Each structure stands twice: as structure tokens, then as C-alpha cells.
């Protein structure tokens, strides 16, 4: 579910910033919307980080026991953890990169809003 939402958000803000040429008011409004989206994705990112770290630790812990005891059930558990760890790392990698891109878009919107405000104050002086 997050993939669809994240891809949609990334596409929307990329289009807005490359084709939309937003003014200061639009930038401020979009900054609020984007801050909310970033908060949602940060929560999801934290949950996936915890799951990924726990799977990684479980894998690291079971492999030495597997090598010492050579039990088929431990071999199966180690194999299962390794097979599940790879998609979790890929999943977290894409989520992290997407959120970092949203941060860049937020910073860009902030610059647009600040530059417009700076121009307004310069004209008032």
C-alpha cells in the first residue's frame, strides 16, 4: 500500500516542481500537505526499520547456532530468515529513498516560498 501512495506523492510533487512553477502561496499550501505526507511515511519508515533490524538480528543470531548444532530445523529457520531479510532490506531501501526525495521537494518548496516573501519585503522597503 505504501508503494502506491509514495509513488503517487513523488510523481505529484515532481510534476508540480518541474512543470507547475508554483508561486509563494501555492508553495506554502503544498508544504503543509507535504509535511503531513512526510509524517505518515516517517511512521511507516520507523516500523519497517524496526522489523528489518529484528529480522537482521534474528538472522545473525541463528547462523552461528546453526553452524554449531547442525540441526535441520535451525537450517530451515536460517534459510527462511535470509529469504525474508532480502525483501525487507529492499522494501526499506525504497521507502527510505522515497522519503529522502520528499525532503528535497519540501526544501525546494520552502525556497520558493522564502524567495517570494523576500521579494515582497524588498518591494515594501
Image: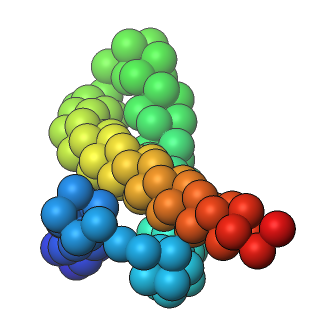
Give me the residue at 57% from left, 67% from top: 116
Place residue 76 in its image quadrant: top left
Drawn side of residue 22 relative to residue 10, left or right: right
Is residue 106 visible to the viewer in this orientation of the structure?
Answer: no
- Residue 31, image x, y percentages: 52, 75
Give me the residue at 63% from left, 63% from top: 119
Q: Nearer the viewer, residue 97 or 79?
A: 97
Give me the residue at 23% from left, 70% from top: 20
Drawn side of residue 120 relative to residue 85, left or right: right
Drawn side of residue 62 relative to residue 82, left or right: right
Q: Quadrant of the C terminus?
A: bottom right
- Residue 104, image x, y percentages: 46, 49
Give me the residue at 51% from left, 61% from top: 112
- Residue 92, image x, y percentages: 36, 48
Q: In the picture shown, does residue 37 fall above or below 118?
A: below
Q: Residue furthest toward the right? A: 125
Amino acid at each position: 500500500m505504501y508503494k502506491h501512495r509514495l509513488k503517487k506523492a513523488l510523481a505529484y510533487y515532481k510534476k508540480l516542481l518541474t512543470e507547475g512553477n508554483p508561486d509563494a502561496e501555492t508553495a506554502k499550501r503544498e508544504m503543509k500537505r507535504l509535511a503531513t505526507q512526510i509524517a505518515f511515511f516517517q511512521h511507516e519508515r520507523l516500523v519497517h526499520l524496526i522489523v528489518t533490524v529484528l529480522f537482521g538480528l534474528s538472522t545473525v543470531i541463528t547462523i552461528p547456532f546453526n553452524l554449531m548444532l547442525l540441526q535441520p530445523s535451525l537450517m530451515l529457520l536460517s534459510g527462511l530468515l535470509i529469504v525474508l531479510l532480502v525483501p525487507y532490506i529492499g522494501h526499506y531501501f525504497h521507502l527510505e529513498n522515497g522519503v529522502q526525495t520528499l525532503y528535497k521537494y519540501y526544501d525546494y518548496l520552502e525556497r520558493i516560498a522564502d524567495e517570494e516573501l523576500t521579494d515582497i519585503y524588498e518591494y515594501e522597503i
